[in-house]
Amino acid sequence: MNMSTESKKPLLVLDDISLSFKGVKAITDISFNVYEGEICSVIGPNGAGKSSMLNVINGVYIPQEGTITFDGKQFNKMKPHTAAVMGIARTFQNIALFKGMSVLDNIMSGRNLMMKATFWETALNIGRAKREEMEHRLEVEKIIEFLGLQSIRKTPVASLPYGLQKRVELGRALAAEPKMLLLDEPMAGMTMEEKLDMSCFIQEVNRNLGTTIVLIEHDMGVVMDISDHVVVLDYGKKIGDGPPSEVMNNQDVIDAYLGVSH
């Protein structure tokens, strides 16, 4: 586990976030911090507001109330482009890859924000475009090696098994060199072996690259194994927030998962 939260500073501060759709509340007055260098799991029953919370963090949804502070800058309205530029990357429940493109090209697409060449330089592969292509390819090759994807680097992702596609999506998010990585159910639908692999990669990203990670996960074994910090949502409200062992002994959390409160 990482050092205690008292000795770290928050990278992300969510303060009294409320979000509703046509009067139906998805999130109600939720506040929590995510500290630099930690793995924070957001858990809760289906419909608890977990994905909505990730969508608020990276600007897909704009909350009606509350503020988001990321890396010392406060926002009432975070926008997806701003989030990406500031260093927030995201994977999704449903794989969002370019299925006809190779593993290498999919991961390369994650570096688009860093490319400075003009449209014509890129189209003609001249000037900065040629130099950038080489520099970015070197970085992408490091990610491919890091994630053990060398043998399939030229393979179209559509022909890969599900677990490998999820790993490629992780690679594309890492290509943006994020400060914070948002993972929306990165292990959903995986075999036990694939889950173990993904858990190891998430921990390696956190430890070796120093990336702060926020993930939604349903597998409590995984949550307990890899998390430094757990936030529990139920019906759009926060019912738990703290170290895994503390949260799992919280009676409100036990009731929510056992169905007592439902």
Image (spheres, rainbow, N blue to C red):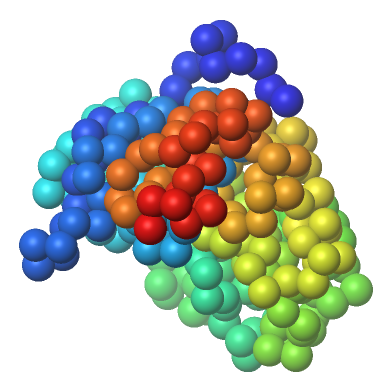
* Position of residue 123 measured from the top left corner of the image (x, y, whole percent): 49, 79
State the residue in front, 236 or 1.
236
State the residue in front, 247 or 231.
247
- Residue shown at the point (52%, 76%) measured from the top left: 94
- Residue shown at the point (77%, 82%) measured from the top left: 161
For residue 182, side relative to residue 165 (left or right): left
- Residue 127 in view (yes/no): no
For residue 11, side relative to residue 206 (left or right): left
State the residue in front, 251 or 83.
251
- Residue 260 in view (yes/no): yes
Q: Residue furthest top?
A: 7
- Residue shown at the point (18%, 37%) measured from the top left: 66
- Position of residue 139 relative to residue 4, above or below, is below
- Residue shown at the point (81%, 49%) measured from the top left: 200
Image quarter of the N terminus:
top right
* Position of residue 82 measured from the top left corner of the image (x, y, whole percent): 31, 48
For residue 15, side relative to residue 123 (left or right): left
Q: Residue furthest right?
A: 151
For residue 249, side relative to residue 115 (left or right): right
Question: How many numbered marks does the figure carry?
Answer: 0
- Position of residue 87 relative to residue 22, above or below, is above
Image quarter of the C terminus:
bottom left
Q: Residue furthest left?
A: 23
* Position of residue 60 measured from the top left corner of the image (x, y, whole percent): 30, 60
Instruction: Choose top left, top right, bottom left or bottom right for residue 129.
Output: bottom right
* Position of residue 187 measured from the top left corner of the image (x, y, whole percent): 67, 63
